[in-house]
Amino acid sequence: MRDVPQLRADVLVIGGGATGAGVAWDAALRGFDVVLVERGDLAEGTSGRFHGLLHSGGRYVVKDPLAAEECVVENAILRDVIPDCIEDTGGLFVATPDDDPAYGDRFLEGCRAAKLPAEEIDVGEALEREPRLNPGIRRAFTVPDASIDAWKTVWSFARGAASHGARILTYHRVIDLHRTGDAVTGVRVRNELTGEDSDIEAGFVLNASGAWAAQILHMAGIEDVGVVPGKGIMIAMNHRLVNTVINRCTMPDDGDILVPIRTVSVIGTTDIRSADPDEIPVTQAEVDQMLDDGERLVPGFRDARALRVWAGVRPLFQDAKAGAVTDTRDVSRTHAVVDHRERDGVDGLLTMSGGKLTTLRLMAQDLVDSMCAQLGEERACRTREERPPGNEDGEPYRLGSRLRRREATLRDEPLICECELIGRRRLEEAMRRRGTASLDDIRRSLRLGMGPCQGGFCIYRATGILHAVDRLDADEAGASLQTFLQERWKGIWPILYGDQLRQACLDDWIFQGLLDVEHLPAAEAVAV
Amino acid sequence: MSHHDVVVVGTGLAGLAAAVRLAEAGARVLVLAKGIGATHLSGGTVDVLGYAPERVERPADALGAFLAARPGHPYNHVGGDGIRTALAWLEDRVANGSLAPYAYLGSLDENLLLPTAIGVPRPSAFVPATMAGGDLRRGGAGGDVVVVGFRALKDFHPALMADALGRSGIGVSARSVELDLVPEGRADVNALGFARAFDVPAFRGQVVAQVAARGLGAEDRVAFPAVLGIADPHGAWTGLEHGLGRRVFEVPTLPPSVPGMRLFAILREALRRAGGTVLLNNVVVGAEREGPRVSALRVRVGLREERRGADWVVLATGGFASGGLELDSRWAARETALGLPVTGVPAAGDERFRSGYFDDHPIARAGVAVDRELRPLDSAGDPVLENVLVAGATLAGAEPWKEKSGDGLSLSTGHRAAELVLAASTTAADPHAAAARI
């Protein structure tokens, strides 16, 4: 076997989602030399596939008080350290005609216990604030929910880590864990773009791979920890049906959250046990159920335009010692550090289990604290006060901030994506900075093609610019375009009705009718 | 309530073809439309049949087997002769139209092979003369294709097109030139803005000077985005050909489509000259019936509702793309103007779309089924209305994007609808009385 290139680090973080990025940021701030490996793009897994809710904790006050308390604290910290990623929408818990109004009393009681500042308001006041809400609601409570941009969050922490020396390796899949005796000493990774393998030697390995954690542990010979992937589907609606996060005031159930984020609103979610975190297709029945749930919160929901549907997988852990799990929603949403020295007699390896995006900072702190304890080092956590790049001015994100920036350059450069207001310079800069040939990567970085036309107009333009900027040849650019169209299709076909079907037909007109992309030479190369 | 011999609903290619043909034959024609039709989206080429599913070189030869395998396809109601007649009719309308000598050329006998804006050779039967120079069937024929684009026109990327064309395996070498010429000093100008600039000789002069400065081979031909003039496209095109001393051709690109706008303008002006009327912002929302006939249309105009009487109705409101058909969130399909039966929509619970974007999707051929007289049919195959004819993308049975047949279908079925109305009317001495009787 030929030699493979070597890298060395104090700490190797597996997983480029919210947890992994948070861990890399935390460890880099404490002065560790960090390498983070991610099999795909940052936030391509669970983190980029959630509803965008920064929990106040209200959802958990009755059922999972510990999770609620964590949310209360972490919500406030994140507002302070990554303000640019968060919009202060506020939240409402409302009792719909189908909900028991008495639950509101238990809810308020739970909020008090968790020190969550909730307040009951007049139904009339709630309807005035959110006129599209179901007029039949019977009670309403305000809470400090907010919406949070997962991509921006993960990128903020990853950039912050990089600014402290961390190396962030995307498209690097872990294919083996190296063990020497009882200790994990590193990993072998495969570069998914080039096919090259390399070894990374590490003083410590932190497994932050969420729903994929069990797959990593199996490589270390640890077979009896399982992850129960809990599939949740979400649908992005064309505009802000509400400007406040709306929660049903009831025990957590399907389709009970509506989150206004950026220019859309997202309804979520379901919770269905799934066998494989990489096989989470959206079914027609799930979409139908979600639309019915939306109708309960906002009458006329079915007539609004759905933009895109996707599914994510929650990383809900199942320890063989803890017994069988039947309903994944009953698993606590708090997190826990799995200590493999204690549990399995394996040194140099810790796994983060469970958790949620709202508490990512605390999860990272707990994991790095545990590592420090095992290493016998005392290094204080600094993530409560340090702001990663892009958030220094402390200004919260406001809807319309992109438009304001954009208006300043309106006469200087072409607007490439009208839906998401992306100018040519910003697009070129992102392409150069990321050095990627994937339009889907660009989508996650800039929201390119995420608006109502789902790339109908901007993606041909972006393909032309990618060809010009990155000197991709036309075959590669064409392949990137076709891959984007296929990825996009996965997210739109289950919700193609009404105006979005009309939009999809217009997009067919452009791509198939006008450009004839299906006869690009690269067509055969695209995996479906 | 007004009364017309024929009310045409929709102002895309199908509706306009029907209206012009009828008005020129003496019928009193009113066109009602929600807005301007799909001409402004379409590339301006009239593709009859490009893929079946292999690339078609000679549509006239391929049609027989193609239709035999697809008994529900709307071309069956027109036939090869009907398509040929419609193409000849349109060729004549354009050649004698308001933008003459701007003209179309081509026929059912052979497809031209024109490059798309992303460099794919695309088969097309009947095209503006301004595009025909791009024909790739004989490869490069000695020279290069020089693709000219503009930095300020984000909807056309010359380097990508030239690179892809060179790799298309068709024996063409291509290179690109991007100019920084900006009409009105703006950074972001769409196709229509450039088309207006190309109407002005001084702007064309600047383009010629800058392209010539890059050096052209003696045998080269020069490709431009399809923005060469809107008021005087023939003048703009020939002006560039003379100025550069080379063949020049246009390449369709993203909407708004300048060639489509030209076609719309020519047909609308032809209709006006023949005495027909177009009313936009007139949304047909239903009909009054007398037995199996429509006697009047209910039309929403702003907040009012009006009635428009007609002996005949030609429905050409388009498919799902144009709002002629709608699918609701419970997957019920609806024809939006008259509530005609829609066929081809899989039942609830059945698969409507497949998971691959380029797959054959079960819903793709949905639409209104018609008999040979283009009259709408119910699910049992019986005509539901005697004096309503359906044309264009509302029709069931075709896959216009995959087949590259959209404009050919619209033109030929729109023209055919007019012929059917006229044939029925001329069976009596007084066409108006006949129309009323039939």
Image (cartoon, rainbow, N blue to C red):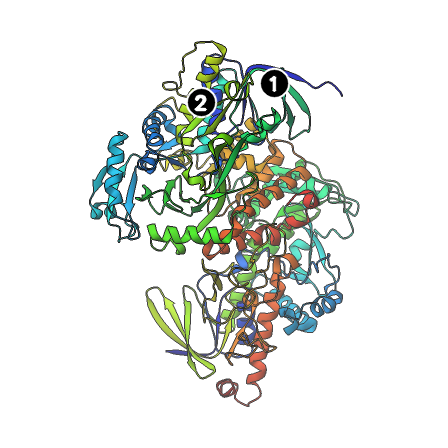
Looking at the picture, does residue B225 appear above or below residue B78? above
Looking at the picture, does residue A350 appear above or below residue A421? above
- Residue named by callout 2: A364
Residue type beneath disc 2:
Ala
Camera-side residue: B296 or A297? A297
Instruction: Classify 10 Å Cα crowding around label 2: few (below 14), some (14-19), many (20 and above).
Output: many
- Residue named by callout 1: A186
Give the mark, 2 or 1, whose residue is nearer the N terminus: 1
Label 2, label 1: how far apart the Cα atoms are: 20 Å
Q: Is mark 1 on a helix, strand or loop?
A: strand
Residue type beneath disc 1:
Gly
Both labels 2 and 1 in a single chain: yes
Residue most extreme to the top? A377
**Mark 1 falls within which chain?**
A
Residue A153: % across, % down: 44, 29
For residue A496, say whether it is visible. Answer: yes
Camera-side residue: B282 or A177? A177
Residue most extreme to the bottom? B429
For residue A35, say whether it is visible. Answer: no
Quarter of the image that includes the N terminus of chain A: top right
Identify the residue shown where x is 43% and y is 64%: B280
Looking at the picture, does residue A247 appear above or below residue B130? above
Quarter of the image that includes the C terminus of chain A: top right
Residue A177: % across, % down: 62, 22
Identify the residue shown where x is 63% and y is 47%: B117
Camera-side residue: B138 or A93? A93
Instruction: Classify 10 Å Cα crowding around label 1: few (below 14), some (14-19), many (20 and above).
Output: many
Q: In the drawing, does residue B236 fall left or right of residue B437? A: right
| Rendering quarter of residue A12 | top right
**Mark 2 falls within which chain?**
A
